[in-house]
Amino acid sequence: MINKPKGTNDILPEESYRWHFLEARIRDLTACYGYHEIRTPIFESTELFVRGVGDGTDIVDKEMYTFQDRSERSLTLRPEGTASAVRAYIEHGLHQKEERCKLYYIGPMFRYERPQAGRFRQHYQFGLELYGESSPWADVEVISVVSRLYAELGLSNVIINLNSIGCSGCRSEIRDTLRGFLERNLESLCEDCRRRYDKNPLRVLDCKNPQCKTIMSGSPCAIDSICPDCREHFEGVKHGLALLGIQYQINPALVRGLDYYTRTVFEFVSTGLGAQNAVGGGGRYDNLVHELGGPRLPAVGFSTGMERVILTMQNENADPQNTENTELRVIALGKEAEEAAFRLTYDLRRLGLRTDMDFRNKSLKAQLRLTDKMNEHFALIIGEAEIKERAAVLKDLAARTESKVSLDNAEQIVKNIRGAHA
Ligand code: HAM
């Protein structure tokens, strides 16, 4: 017996309707906002993530699935979608056609993390990216897509954490202020954070070590050292959110686990998810397109972990109804009936009715039990007696009624069933 790899999930048929429901809401919503889907490879050159996500982040240092292919190229299973989307945007010259570009993606991401509830080594993300817009309205639009999505899914206990971590202009001042504070506490920080002190002090704010967390609760905040332009941008974001009635809380400790962010960062936190409570996150990344070889164009984006969204929906009793079951079971009793039933089943399916038929010659009782197990609302019973009259018995199992229908009128059977549902 070979089991699935640690930290991965099989999405079984009885759960897949939840995924289809979520994906359908995502596709409806992204269409309303003018985003178009992009599908990029599951693996990329390792260099893309080292440069994109950032050397010194946990993702790059500890969590990537990196391997050499048979030609000794270093490849990595994508840990996130932003770097890949930017690469494709540049590689295909999408910016030459129109700088402003709105992309979304749905797909699996891979991170070698310690698995626990809500944290997996393969997880799915829905993400979107908006290129070519520097206005705070763009940040607000992105946040509004996500908050609309959560609202439409029935999630009400999701809180938005918002912060600004400055731009390349003011980042050095933010770093210096932070280094000054860290210097005084260097001895008490974990080994990783002592390294971060030199390389990327903002990362210390993201450390999960409890002692580092306690120390950092008294650290200076990036938000207090941002430049006037970043401040104006941040005020614009807050104003836009207020205009749309989107509630948020400022979290000065929020820096996010990826290095490409500038100015706005945000995270959506679900109060019912336990330790892995971030359902989604994102922010502005005005330097990444240029850093990955493209023109100097601003960008902002977001992604949400789909397993965490589904878990949150279940926790909040917002589980959707499963509307993917077959509606009707055609039950044939005897050889002659089987042929007529098989033909009729074909016609009913052609008319769009979700219909099933069993070929194992089970008894009427066994087949009715199966109907019940499959949550089907109707059974159409064709026995030897009915065949002679070219008729069948249509049982409405929920209403506990039955009627005689013609075997030669599939349209009428569909009408009867649809009428009963209406
Ligand atoms: P991220 O915060 O690293 O951001 O991941 C986005 C979301 O993916 C998280 O909020 C969480 O819901 C989910 N997630 C991450 N890791 C796991 C895991 N191991 N198991 C289950 N779910 C997980 C990004 O990836 C950025 N690319 C977001 C972005 C897009 N920023 C700008 N554009």
Image (cartoon, rainbow, N blue to C red):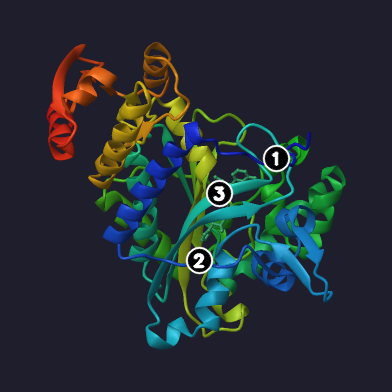
Exactly how many numbered labels are in the figure? Answer: 3
Please tell me in which quadrant of the rendered image residue 209 appears: top right
Residue at image mark 1: 7
> Tag 3 or tag 2, which sits nearer the N-term?
2
Under mark 1, the amino acid is Gly
Q: What distance separates the C-alpha of mark 2 from that of mark 3? A: 13 Å
Q: Secondary structure at mark 2?
A: loop
Which disc number belongs to residue 39? 2
Q: Earlier in the sequence, mark 2 or mark 1?
A: 1
Residue 14 image offset from top left, x and y in percent: 48, 31
Q: Looking at the image, which residue is at 37% across and 21% down?
A: 371
On screen, residue 337 versus residue 313, left or right, reads left
The reply to whether the residue tagged 1 has its Cβ within 8 angstroms of ligand 1 is yes
Above or below — where is 85 with respect to 139?
Answer: below
Secondary structure found at label 3: strand
Is residue 247 placed above or below 138 in the rendered structure?
Answer: above
Q: Quadrant of the C terminus?
A: top left
